Image (cartoon, helix red, strand yellow):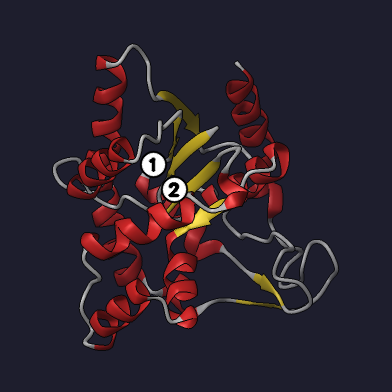
Amino acid sequence: MKILFFGPNGSGKGTQGAIVKKKYGIPHIETGVIFRENISGGTELGKQAKAYIDRGELVPDSITIPMILDRLKEDDCKNGWLLDGFPRNLNQAKALDQALKAEGITLDIVIEMILDREIAKGRIMGRRLCVNDNNHPNNINIDAIKPDGDKCRICGGELKTRSDDQDEEAIDQRHNIYYDTETGTMAGVNYFKELSAKNNGVPRIIELDGRPGVQEVSQELLEKLEK
């Protein structure tokens, strides 16, 4: 089961990806982790990527995609994988599709978490972190996990906010890229949808409503994956 997972910041994509990883025993691969592993490991691609990063430049797709392909060829990916965080735009979607085909790798499923932009933004800004355990879910803008005043709903610990969660300009910039249907991430999602329509449903497209709670979304996701 080889999966691409799309969803805007604030949609809960990371949480759902972890659930799929546990259910199917496949690695949840995030591009940020791939970069860090290659750079810390001193690989040739890592050295090239670091040179761009040190100059404050974006790492080109000619380096990023080979890194991803190397990761997908590792032993733990033999039974499948879930790739999260790439592609981020239309050109990357096209390049990844071509690279996978060149390697004889068939993409089975594309998952898209659908969530209104303002709701996604509200969820990001509503996140609160428990000082005792960051995995305790607390969000002042989600009724199901709303904290008890200024205390963690799970353990009663103190809550804090991440500074980047309160940076509206940064959130808007990330969402500008994601929700762009001309050249951004949504354009990439639509590319794979068009590909599916042309190829008799390959890859299979799964659309998820990101508005309900975590359990409801994960139930819908697992039911659709089993079909």
* Residue 47 in sight in this render: yes
At mark 2, the secondary structure is helix
Image coords of residue 138 (percent x, y)? 68, 61
Residue 190 or residue 167, whichever sits in front: 190
Amino acid at dot 2: Ile
Instruction: Identify the residue at image location x=38%, y=74%.
Output: 167
Image coords of residue 136 (percent x, y)? 74, 63
Locate residue 98: give its quadrant.
Answer: top left
* Residue density around tag 2, few if under 14, some if 14–19, many if 20 or more, within 10 Å: some
At mark 1, the secondary structure is loop
Instruction: Identify the residue at image location x=23%, y=72%.
Output: 58
Residue 14 or residue 137, whichever sits in front: 14
* Residue density around tag 1, few if under 14, some if 14–19, many if 20 or more, within 10 Å: few
* Residue 10 in sight in this render: no
Amino acid at dot 1: Asp
Instruction: Identify the residue at image location x=70%, y=70%.
Output: 134
Instruction: Identify the residue at image location x=26%, y=32%.
Output: 190
Q: Are marks 1 and 2 in contact (CB under 8 Å)?
A: yes
Residue furthest to the left in view is 182
Residue furthest to the bottom in view is 54
The residue identified by callout 1 is 116
The residue identified by callout 2 is 119
**Quadrant, the N terminus:** top right
On residue 79, the disc is none
Locate residue 157: give its quadrant.
Answer: bottom right
Image coords of residue 88 (percent x, y)? 29, 52
